[in-house]
Image (spheres, coloured by chain):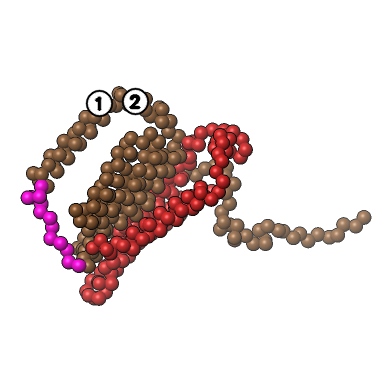
């Protein structure tokens, strides 16, 4: 059972390697002589003007929320991808299942149209 | 201790550590990143319990999307950590009461009377090649098709609400509609006027 996740483990290890190895290499190979000026926050040559945390436009959150909603949609479609072949093979409910998912998608396309027409996806 | 038990304890240790760091980290961004680690490890524990679909959804929806929103919020909102800490002692009684209540409730439920090994023995092992994503798919689109369609309506409502609550048009931007830009014809921009030549 656990053996079937070996490819996933390989993926995780490769991903970790991609993240860590360049940083380590840069640290080991490049010269590293820090001083307080080099390590201080840098803002185009000036002293930092203000705190990095400030009020951001609510539109960033709108994009993130819409992303979550479409991500959830994918979660609902995921089992479909695994079983639809079986339904076709059984031949019994294939069209029903297909129709059900298409209705599901159609309702979400309505949401997509609402977003588009309201300009929620535009960046003015 | 076989390999599976080892993996479980390994993941469990990381999970408990990450969860503790979520509430003890001083920097809210670090807390959010530890929460990502906690979700990811919990996904691993679920994989061990043969709950592949839950594990995938946890990683995809929570790590992939919800935590992005969380990080957005804690990185971009101007929260003053000192000001957040001010009310600590005045909030402590209420917080402690709720915490103790939660612990008591969980001990009653998980204390062995309802979830002990005698009441809930280990389920029989599934056949080789059993996948609970498949099992879910087999009933989700047939038997539970009505709740499935309702879920799409819930998502639709959430989309419309998100758009109506947060979208406001701003005045005075230099935004140009690309449609209009593309649709421009020569006639819209240049006008040729016929006029007699001026002679002196």
Q: Are marks 2 and 1 on the same chain?
A: yes
Do we see residue B142 in this rendering?
no
Do we see residue A124 in this rendering?
yes
Secondary structure under tag 1 reads: helix
Quadrant of the snapshot with the N terminus of chain A: bottom left
Q: Quadrant of residue B126?
A: bottom left
Q: Residue at x 13, y 57 (%)?
A: B123
Q: Is residue B137 left or right of residue B166?
A: left
Say which of B61 and B23 sits in front: B23
Badge 2 vs badge 1, beta-carbon distance below 8 Å: no
Q: Quadrant of residue A34?
A: top right
Mark 2, other Cα within 10 Å: few <14 / some 14–19 / many ≥20:
few
Q: Which residues are magenta?
A: B116-128
In the picture, the disc for residue B93 is 1
* Colour of chain B in the rendered structure image: brown
Location of residue B103 in the rendering, given as x and y in whole percent from the top left corner: 19, 36
Answer above or below: position of B33 versus B91: below
Answer above or below: position of B167 versus B180: above
Q: Is residue B114 left or right of residue A52?
A: left
User: Closer to the N terminus: mark 2 or mark 1?
Assistant: 2
Label 2, on which residue?
B87
Residue that protrudes farthest toward the top in the picture: B90
Answer above or below: position of B61 versus B172: below
Secondary structure under tag 2 reads: loop
Answer above or below: position of B30 versus B39: above
């Amino acid at each position: 059972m656990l053996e079937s996740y070996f490819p996933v483990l390989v993926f995780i290890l490769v991903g970790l390697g991609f993240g860590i190895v360049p940083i380590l290499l840069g640290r080991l190979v490049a010269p590293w002589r820090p001083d307080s000026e080099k390590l201080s926050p840098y803002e185009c040559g000036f002293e930092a003007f203000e705190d990095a945390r400030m009020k951001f436009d609510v539109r960033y959150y709108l994009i993130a929320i819409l992303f979550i909603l479409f991500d959830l949609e994918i979660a609902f479609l995921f089992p479909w991808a695994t079983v639809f072949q079986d339904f076709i093979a059984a031949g019994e409910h294939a069209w029903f299942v297909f129709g059900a998912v298409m209705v599901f998608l159609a309702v979400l396309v309505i949401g997509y149209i609402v977003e588009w027409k309201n300009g929620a996806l535009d960046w003015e | 201790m076989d390999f599976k038990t080892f993996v479980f304890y390994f993941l469990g240790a990381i999970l408990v550590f990450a969860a503790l760091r979520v509430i003890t980290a001083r920097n809210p961004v670090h807390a959010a990143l530890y929460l990502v680690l906690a979700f990811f490890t919990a996904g691993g524990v679920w994989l061990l319990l043969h709950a592949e679909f839950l594990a995938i959804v946890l990683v995809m929806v929570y790590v992939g999307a919800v935590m992005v929103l969380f990080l957005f919020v804690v990185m971009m909102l101007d929260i003053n950590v000192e000001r957040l800490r001010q009310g600590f002692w005045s909030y402590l009684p209420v917080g402690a009461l709720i915490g103790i209540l939660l612990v008591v409730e969980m001990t009653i439920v998980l204390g062995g009377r309802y979830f002990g090994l005698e009441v809930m023995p280990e389920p029989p092992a599934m056949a080789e090649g059993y996948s609970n994503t498949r099992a879910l798919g087999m009933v989700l689109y047939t038997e539970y098709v009505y709740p499935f369609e309702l879920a799409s309506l819930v998502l639709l409502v959430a989309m419309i609400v998100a758009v109506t609550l947060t979208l406001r048009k701003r005045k005075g931007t230099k935004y140009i509609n690309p449609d209009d830009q593309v649709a421009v014809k020569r006639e819209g921009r240049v006008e040729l006027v016929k006029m007699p030549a001026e002679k002196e």
